[in-house]
Image: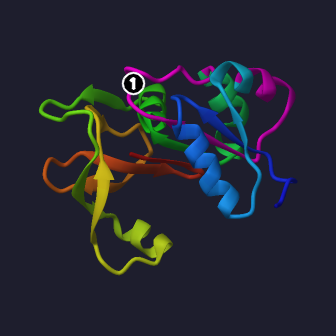
Amino acid sequence: MNNSHKIIVINLENHYGFKTAQAIQQLGYHPFVLNPKNAELWLKENTAQAIILAGGSAENALQPPTETLLLQRHGRQVPIMGIDYGMDWLASHLGGKVEKFVGCDSEYKEREVELNPVLMARLGVIEKHQNVLLGHGDVVSTVPPEFSVMARALADDEIVAMTNGPIWAVK
């Protein structure tokens, strides 16, 4: 394990942060899993090499550390990844728009998405259309200024991935 990397997983809801950390550990890194309050305290004294906001639905999720600590202190200098509710939080705090998606329940379902050619190249993917699991009723309807849409759900045009430099977010 490579303990020299300070990867912080901010656990916004129950198991999401721990599952994310397990996946990172399988890559050979040792991430810190912290709740939002402890992450805020840790970030005041330390510099992360990467920050991951991992969470489920907004109804159950805890609030991440303050915008100032995450985005102004670390912002463009440190890679930030928002997963699920983490994507919603990043979008809404950086000038995008998040809405309830009418007609969607909280269960995860397989849905077809269309990948942006840039994302396809980065992932080494040949097929433009991919089947992925998507769920719950919160959607990013407008990405923040200067962000690019990297993937959309075909059935309803839901934005499911966005990026701006070192900030990435996926549903």
Q: Please report the residue visible at 52 percent of the width from the left and 39 percent of the height from the top.
A: 16
The local secondary structure at tag 1 comes to loop
Count of numbered marks: 1
Asked if residue 127 is among those painted magenta in the image, a careful observer would answer no
> Where does residue 166 sit, x and y in percent of width and height?
60, 51
Q: Is residue 78 left or right of residue 145?
A: right
What residue sits 65% from the left and 26% below the top? 35
Quick one: 156 or 147, which is closer to the camera?
156
Q: Residue furthest bottom?
A: 126
Question: Was residue 59 drawn as part of the magenta stretch in this picture?
Answer: yes
For label 1, the crowd category at 10 Å Cα-Cα, with few meaning under 14, some 14 to 19 and many 20 or more, is some
Residue at (44%, 75%) from the top-left corner?
121
Of 155 and 105, nearer the camera is 105
- Amino acid type, mark 1: Ala
**Whole-percent x, y for residue 48 in the image:** 77, 41
Looking at the image, residue 27 lies above or below residue 168: below
The quarter in which the C terminus is drawn is top left
Residue 155, position as x, y percentages in the image: 13, 52
Residue ID for mark 1: 58
Q: Is residue 44 left or right of residue 18?
A: right
Give the side of residue 53 with respect to residue 146, left or right. Answer: right
Q: Position of residue 109 (x, y in %)?
A: 24, 49
**Which quarter of the figure has residue 65?**
top right
Quadrant in which the N terminus appears: bottom right
Decide which of 156, 95 is in the foreground and name it.
156
Q: Which residues are magenta?
A: 40-66
Position of residue 64 relative to residue 124, above or below, is above
